[in-house]
Image (tube, rainbow, N blue to C red):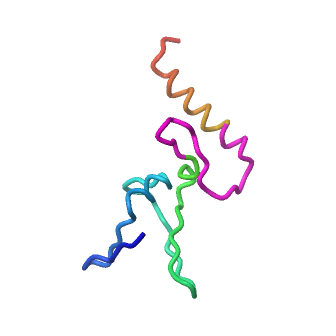
Amino acid sequence: MRTALDRFGRIVIPKEIRDAAGLVAGSEMEVVAGTDGIVLRTLDDDLMLVTSDDGVLVFVGVAQENLAAVVRRHREARVASLAGGLPG
């Protein structure tokens, strides 16, 4: 996919790529210049898990910890947010 710098030196990441990576406005990224080009890396750990169009949680990063623990944390947070509206 091709894109171009605007006159201010900004680059637009195509929507398909932003959606697939879970990027939203304000997402922090690291820019690394190497001998073979420029690499953008996301800095937000939450971006490793994104929700697909059909509502399935999808891992899109490189595993750096126990995936079962990450899924459990996200599940607990989701359940807590859903239960927040219920009388307890």
Q: Residue 43, image x and y in percent?
A: 53, 61
Residue 39 vs residue 11: left or right?
A: right
- Check the image and report above or below for 55 versus 58: above
Q: Residue furthest top?
A: 87
Image quarter in which the N terminus is found: bottom left
Residue 63 included in the magenta stretch of the image: yes
Q: Residue 63, image x and y in percent?
A: 69, 55
Q: Residue furthest left?
A: 7
Q: Residue 5, image x and y in percent?
A: 32, 77
Q: Residue drawn at (46%, 61%), measured in percent from left and top?
A: 28
Q: Residue drawn at (70%, 57%), measured in percent from left and top?
A: 64
Residue 52 vs residue 14: left or right?
A: right
- Check the image and report above or below for 33 versus 25: below
Q: Which residues are magenta?
A: 50-71
* Quadrant position of residue 70: top right
- Check the image and report above or below for 14 versus 45: below
Q: Residue drawn at (33%, 73%), measured in percent from left and top?
A: 10
